[in-house]
Image (cartoon, rainbow, N blue to C red):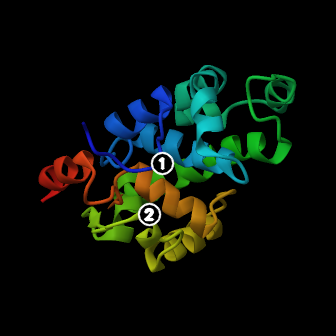
Amino acid sequence: MTERCWWPGNDPIYISYHDTEWGVPIRKDQVLFEFICLEGQQAGLSWITVLKKRDHYRKCFKNFEVDKVARMKDATIEKLLLDRSLIRNRLKLYSIRSNAKAFQKIQKEFGSFEKYIWRFVNNTTIDGKRKAAKDIPTTTPESDAMSKDLKKRGFKFVGSTICYAFMQAAGLVNDHTNNCFRYKQLKNKTS
């Protein structure tokens, strides 16, 4: 039997996400943009709620193509607020567009968002070396610094806990517990 982290439980969507995506280092700006936006949509909710809506978010938000999202009109976002397949929170939905604009500024300043965001971990995945769920923090000094800087640059829904979840999902930290088969696979890829 394959050993994995405790959190996917028996949900096939969660298991697939855990086994193929969570913790894989992301270097592509479009995917980083999607991940940071979706983590913000999660605020106050469970990740599975967002994960089940992810394909619809991709459809509604131009597959998270930053330039297209930055040009979205208020009328379009207002219409999305009526869409039951999204999390219908005005601040959260509008944050996707405002985050796209802030994202563009970072791309212009640093050449890519990837260059900017990976600086918070010295361009190397942090090995969490977690033995159990209780060993996994909800924030770290790196997520605190990331959150503070993103907020300063105009991002919304990027508190330290959201930033840490983003770091875990986007592979800036390997927080698979060390008994999980993915921990060793990802550790070997990043070492």
Q: Amino acid at mark 2?
A: Ala
Quarter containing the C terminus: bottom left
* Relative vertical location of residue 172 with respect to residue 128 in this rendering, above or below: above
The location of residue 43, given as percent across then percent down, is 69, 53
Residue 73 picture location, percent across and down? 78, 30
Q: Residue at x 31, y 67 (%)?
A: 131
Q: Residues within 10 Å of mark 2 (few under 14, many from 20)?
A: few
Please identify the quadrant where the N terminus is shown: top left
In this picture, is 142 found above or below 30?
Answer: below
Q: Image quadrant of residue 53?
A: top right
- Kindly identify which residue carries mark 1: 7
123 relative position to 91: left or right: left
Residue 171 at least partly seen: yes
Q: Which residue is mark 2?
A: 133
Quadrant location of residue 48? top right
Circles 2 and 1, Cβ within 8 Å, touching? The answer is: yes
Q: Nearer the viewer, residue 66 or 47?
A: 47
For the point 61% across and 19% down, the residue is 59
* Residue 70 location (% of width, % of height): 64, 37
Observer-nearest of 1 and 40: 1
Amino acid of disc 1: Trp
Q: Note whether 140 is above or below 30 in the view shown.
A: below
